[in-house]
Every structure is written in C-alpha cells, then in structure tokens.
C-alpha cells in the first residue's frame, strides 16, 4: 500500500480531520522541549476513542507501519519524537481527554490517557480529594505520558512514583487487541500484575488509553518554608531531622543551589528571592496534613528552630498565604526552564542513596569543574528521594555548540561517579532515545535479555516505538 493509501485508510477509521499531513499541522508534534530532536513523519493521527486507537494499531501492525505514541510532548529523552528518516507515524492521544468516572467515597478516578495532569488535579480538588502527582510540566503533560514514563516529581516523597498511584489500566496492544484492566481494587493477587509492565515502558509495549487512579484526602493544612543553608550536608541533616519528626506529613523536600535561584531571579516572571541575604544552598520544605486539628505550623517551627540552633539552617521564610506558598513553589518548578536562557546545559537525571547525596555532589561538582573550568553546575531537585537533576550550564560567554559537543564526555564522567555510589543514570525521565546506549552499560546481559523477551511477547513486529529503551 502506498503512503497516500494508508492515510486514506486511517481517515476512514478516525475521520479525515484527525489525520494531519500538512507540514504546519504536524510541526508542533515534531519538536521537543530540549531541542535535541527534530522529527519527520508522514502523518499525525489523532484518534478520539479506544476503538479508534485499536483500529489504527491493527492496520499499522498488519502493514508493517511504525507508531510513536505521543501525549503532552514534554518527555525529556526523545521517546515521543519520530525518527529523522521519516518512517514513523505519530499517534497523539490528546483527543482522548474525558474523565470517565470519579468516586470520592472510594478515593478513585478513571480518566482517559489524554487528560492533562493539571486538569486531573483540578477534577480531584473539585470533589475535595487530592491527586498528588506534581511536575514542572503539569500544565502540558498528559496522564498517559506520566504513566508511560512512570513520572516522579515533587510529591514522590509522600505518595510514591506514578506507578504507586495506579489501580487499573486500559491498554491497546500493538496488534489492536484491547486489554481492559480498569479495576479499582486495592488488593488483587491474581497472578502477574500486568499493568506494572506498561507503566514506565515508554510506549514500547502498548498504548495506554485509560487509567483508574488513586485519590487521597486533600490537605487541610499546608506549610511551606524556603530555607537558606551552607551546603548539601546541612540539607541532608535537615531532611533527616524533618523526616524523623514529621514522618508522612513531610510532603516536599527540594534542594536548589544559589546559582539556580539567580537564574530564576533573572529569567522567571514573578520570581523574587524569599530571603534577605544570600545563601549557597536552599531547601523548599513542605508539611501538610489531612486534618485541621494537626498543628502543622508548630511542627515546622520546631523542626527549623532546632536545626537553626544546631547551625544547620542560616535563615528561613515561612509562607504566610497560599499565594506565597505558590510563589516559593514557582521558583522550584521554574528551575528547569530558566537554564535554557543561560546557554548550553548538559543534563543528568540521576539518583543515589539519599544519605550519599552530599558526597555525590561534592565529587561531581569538583569533577565537572576540572573538565570544563568555569562551567556552572545547577544541581537541584528531589533530595528526599535521592534524585538530583545534575545539570551543568556552560561557562559565561562560552561557545554553546562547542560546549554541548562535550555532552557524552561529561555524561560519562558524571555517570561514572553515580555508578561508584550505586546510583541510577535515569531516576525519573526514562531511557527513550537519549539514554538507550547507556542502558546497555548499566543492565546485566540477563536483564537486557529478559526485557527483549517481554518486548517480543507484546509487540513481535516491533510496531510500537521501535528503537526506544532497547
Ligand atoms: P510524552 O512526552 O508525549 O511521551 C513520553 C513517552 O511516553 C514517550 O516515549 C511516548 O511515546 C510515551 N507515551 C506517551 N503517551 C503514551 C500513551 N498514552 N501510551 C503509551 N505510551 C505513551 N518528569 C518527571 O518524572 N519528574 C519531573 O519533575 C519532571 N519535570 C519536568 C519539568 C519540565 C519543565 C519538563 C519539560 C519536563 C519534566 N519532566 C519531569 C518530564 C516529562 O514531563 C514527563 O516525562 C512526563 O511524564 C511526560 O508526559 P507527556 O504526556 O508529555 O509524554
């Protein structure tokens, strides 16, 4: 069948208006946030229902076509972008954006894959519940993408990764078969937990079309503090004290260096320094409780007061209103975006055991400074999960292209240090196209073989996201 015939066939399955073949219509689906990949595709398909996704995949699989599922296109490892050779078709889930049902009494919600994360959070709020997943990209990313990347974010500390928020999935397999696993059960030990295979599979095993997710009590009391401190050793000691005293009430613990705050003050609309003086490092700490009665503010003051007396904390600002709490989080969520205005940035999304974070940072910052004198490390992120975005901005005034040409060399250096600390080279962003070669270095031959066998069992014709992950 010729390309035009396939387009006509898809048009008959999902409607001509949902088969995009014009360059201008396809353009937004072919570029990504970091400008690392520029895709080429014959068409973008926009099915509106599970039955349509099934029909599309059945036709593609039977005809040797390659399909790249795409959600909000905020992925940071290139998995959602079709390859430059132009043979992959983009399958956008954006039209599948219905809330199928919400059960506040049972604390569950069932949504389609194309629901934007922020919309999902608001739907939960409207029935006095919390859907805790929170990312800097939440205004664009979709729950199908979050599930497929097993997204982390700022609430993992208290609620776990996306994987832990899922009760059931509906998935269309590569050959068009529909698996309805939309169960809302908290307990179900009936053999292999198949849904977990699709979560974090980055679209290589099936297309997620809907999910039943856990909801939680909405916090009634929330306290946020912006804390200045000398170094990551002090930040770890503060984390340990806060976790010991607050337990599950500690719902956020994010670390940022001064240079990252300065980038925000320069480039992020509405950003203001919450503290009067300058500090080398900052922590954003959040405590929240589902009951009105719990004295959250007293606990925050006690934790920080004690840390101040021990010399761990140099200064702290408490959010006195919801708007101020949002302003503190605005800085943290803006930390990724602002780096693009400071020239080239070489990224590492890594994790090490929580207690190793200060030693890892000490070693990695010295190493990258020796490799590129004048480079500006901006390590920030989820200290409480042991996950640091070890991003390194180019020296001021350096040539961006020449700096970025050293991406692999710097990755190898930093990942070597991560390895020495028994860490992971992809804590939350996944493997996609960007880290595929690295996966081979960190997984044993047996692990790689098992992964290939799973892929072959679910997608024997390599229809879905070929060349991603494996
Ligand atoms: P896409 O980018 O569209 O796709 C991602 C992958 O999932 C691709 O491989 C794609 O093929 C596959 N896929 C998408 N939808 C489906 C589906 N329905 N079925 C099967 N496969 C599918 N990530 C974190 O984990 N934590 C963070 O804190 C975080 N912060 C971020 C901040 C910013 C500013 C940005 C730009 C990104 C951030 N990310 C973060 C990365 C990104 O937002 C997440 O990976 C997100 O989960 C991707 O969702 P998406 O809908 O944009 O997916």
Image: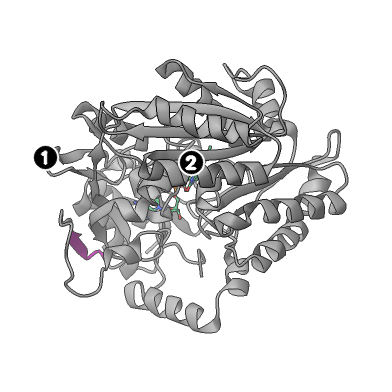
Residue ID at (61%, 42%) = 235
Residue ID at (41%, 59%) = 200
Magenta stretch bounds: 176-181
The answer to whether residue 197 is visible is yes
Q: Position of residue 405 (x, y in %)?
A: 78, 52
Instruction: Look at the image and tell me in which quarter the N terminus lies.
Output: bottom left
Given residues 340 and 334, the one toward you in this image is 334
Q: Which mark is residue 242?
A: 2
Tell whether position 179 is magenta: yes
For label 2, being within 8 Å of ligand 1 is answered no
Q: Which mark is residue 205?
A: none
Residue placed under numbered mark 1 in the picture: 105
Distance, label 2 to label 1, CA atoms, is: 32 Å
Does residue 164 lie above or below 304 as drawn?
below
Given residues 355 and 308, the one toward you in this image is 308
Q: Position of residue 211 (x, y in %)?
A: 24, 50
């Amino acid at each position: 069948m010729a390309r035009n015939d396939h387009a006509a066939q898809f048009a008959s399955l999902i409607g001509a208006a949902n088969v995009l073949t014009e360059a201008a219509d396809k353009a937004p689906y072919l570029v990504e946030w970091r400008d690392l990949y520029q895709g080429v595709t014959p068409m973008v398909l926009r099915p509106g229902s599970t039955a349509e996704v099934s029909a599309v995949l059945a036709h593609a699989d039977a005809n040797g076509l390659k399909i790249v599922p795409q959600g909000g296109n905020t992925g940071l490892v290139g998995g959602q972008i079709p390859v430059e050779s132009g043979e992959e078709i983009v399958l956008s889930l954006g039209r599948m954006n219905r809330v199928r049902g919400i059960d506040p009494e049972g604390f569950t919600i069932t949504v389609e894959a194309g629901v934007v994360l922020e919309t999902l959070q608001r739907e939960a709020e409207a029935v006095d519940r919390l859907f805790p997943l929170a990312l800097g990209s939440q205004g664009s990313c979709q729950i199908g993408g979050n599930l497929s990347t097993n997204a982390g974010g700022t609430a993992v500390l208290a609620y776990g990764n996306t994987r832990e928020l899922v009760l059931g999935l509906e998935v269309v397999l590569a050959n068009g078969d529909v698996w309805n696993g939309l169960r809302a059960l908290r307990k179900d030990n009936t053999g292999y937990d198949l849904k977990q295979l699709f979560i974090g599979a980055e679209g290589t095993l099936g297309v997620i079309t809907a999910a039943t997710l856990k909801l939680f009590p909405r916090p009634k009391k929330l306290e946020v503090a912006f804390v200045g401190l000398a170094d990551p050793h002090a930040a770890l000691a503060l984390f340990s004290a806060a976790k010991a005293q607050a337990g599950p009430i500690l719902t956020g613990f994010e670390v940022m260096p001064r240079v990252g705050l300065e980038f925000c003050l320069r480039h992020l609309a509405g950003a203001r320094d919450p503290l009067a003086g300058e500090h080398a490092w900052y922590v954003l700490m959040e405590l929240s409780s589902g009951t009105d009665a719990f004295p959250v503010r007293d606990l925050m003051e006690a934790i920080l007061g004690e840390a101040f007396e021990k010399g761990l904390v140099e200064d702290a600002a408490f959010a006195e209103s919801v708007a101020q709490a949002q302003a503190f989080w605005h800085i943290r969520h803006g930390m990724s975006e602002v780096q693009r205005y400071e020239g080239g940035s070489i990224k590492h999304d890594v994790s090490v055991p929580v207690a190793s974070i200060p030693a890892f940072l000490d070693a990695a910052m010295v190493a990258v400074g020796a490799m590129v004198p004048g480079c500006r490390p901006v390590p920030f992120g989820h200290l409480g999960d042991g996950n640091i975005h070890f991003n390194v901005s180019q020296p001021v005034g350096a040539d961006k292209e020449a700096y970025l040409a050293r991406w692999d060399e710097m990755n190898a250096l930093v990942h070597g240090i991560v390895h020495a600390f028994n860490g992971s080279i992809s804590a939350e962003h996944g493997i996609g196209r960007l880290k595929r070669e690295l996966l081979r270095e960190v997984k044993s031959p047996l692990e790689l073989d098992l992964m290939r066998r799973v892929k072959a069992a679910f997608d024997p014709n390599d229809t879905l996201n070929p060349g991603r992950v494996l």
